[in-house]
Image (cartoon, helix red, strand yellow):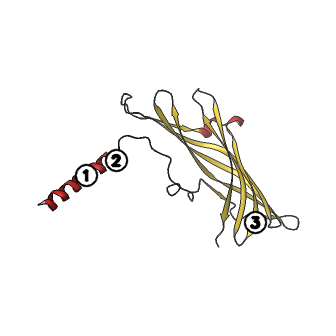
Amino acid sequence: MKIIVFLLIVILLTATTAFAADLGTPLLSESLATRKFFDPDRLLTTGGVKYRGLEGVTIEPQIGVGYTARERDIKGGFEESIHKVHALAGGKIDLAKTLYFSGAAKVPVYTYGLTDSSTSFVSPQVPASRHEYDFTRLSPSTLSWTGEVGLHLGLGADLTIYYDQNLFNSYQPGMTQPEERFGTRIIFRFK
């Protein structure tokens, strides 16, 4: 009888502990295991076109598409998620298969935004979404760019330093906020 009572108490405590695990505590940042390191945010292609100039110098024109997402908090307890698609046009200069420079202009094509309540005590409402076809309103102020300098390490690996600029609409209509990213990455090439 004592064993049955002991087992019931253990089962009850285990269920209570599992139920009390989520008490509405704030979420911590995601772990490195769940980050998407291998999801490409752009696709550039040369179409197989290469120009060989001086000895060891190769020039490759590039075109493609890019994708950028941003989440931010807005005044009043709301969260906004913005997704942008860009057309990319640029090129790559490879010097003696040792060092290369790459750059591309980013032309905005399409923006999708979703605004939703971030707190439970705000009056529930239907999330607001917006779609914008940015290519219909092109101007020099809407263009951004990306570029990188790479060093061929050999064995199908490159070490690069990159710069990426994105423009997002700010809280005030008609104004934009630039977002700039610098970083390094290692690129592995498989044949």
Give the alpha-carbon distance from disc 1 to disc 2, as whole Å. Answer: 12 Å
Task: Rate crowding at label 2 as few (under 14), some (14 to 19) or many (20 or more) other CA atoms within 10 Å.
Answer: few
Circle 1 sits in a helix, a strand or a loop, which is it?
Answer: helix
Which of these two is toward me, 77 or 1? 1
Circle 3 sits in a helix, a strand or a loop, which is it?
Answer: strand
Q: Amino acid at mark 2?
A: Ala
Task: Indicate which label's residue lies in the foreground, 3 or 1.
Answer: 1
Contact flag, marks 2 and 3 (Cβ < 8 Å): no
Q: Is residue 59 left or right of residue 165?
A: right
Task: Compare marks 3 and 1 and give the one earlier in the sequence.
Answer: 1
Task: Rate crowding at label 1 as few (under 14), some (14 to 19) or many (20 or more) other CA atoms within 10 Å.
Answer: few
Which of these two is toward me, 5 or 63? 5
Taking the spot 35% from the left edge, 41% from the top edge, the residue there is 23
Residue 164 at x, y = what percent?
Answer: 68, 47
The residue at which mark 3 appears reads as 152
The residue at which mark 1 appears reads as 13
Taking the spot 22% from the left edge, 52% from the top edge, the residue there is 12
Circle 2 sits in a helix, a strand or a loop, which is it?
Answer: loop
Which of these two is toward me, 172 or 9? 9
Q: Residue furthest front?
A: 2
Which of these two is toward me, 161 or 89? 161
Q: Amino acid at mark 3?
A: His
Q: Is residue 34 left or right of residue 120?
A: right
Give the alpha-carbon distance from disc 3 to disc 1, as whole Å. Answer: 59 Å
* Residue 44 vertical placement versus 174 (above, below): below
Taking the spot 67% from the left edge, 63% from the top edge, the residue there is 187
Give the alpha-carbon distance from disc 2 to disc 3, as whole Å. Answer: 49 Å
The residue at which mark 2 appears reads as 21
**Quadrant of the snapshot with the C terminus:** bottom right
Q: Amino acid at mark 1?
A: Leu
Task: Compare marks 2 and 3 and give the one earlier in the sequence.
Answer: 2
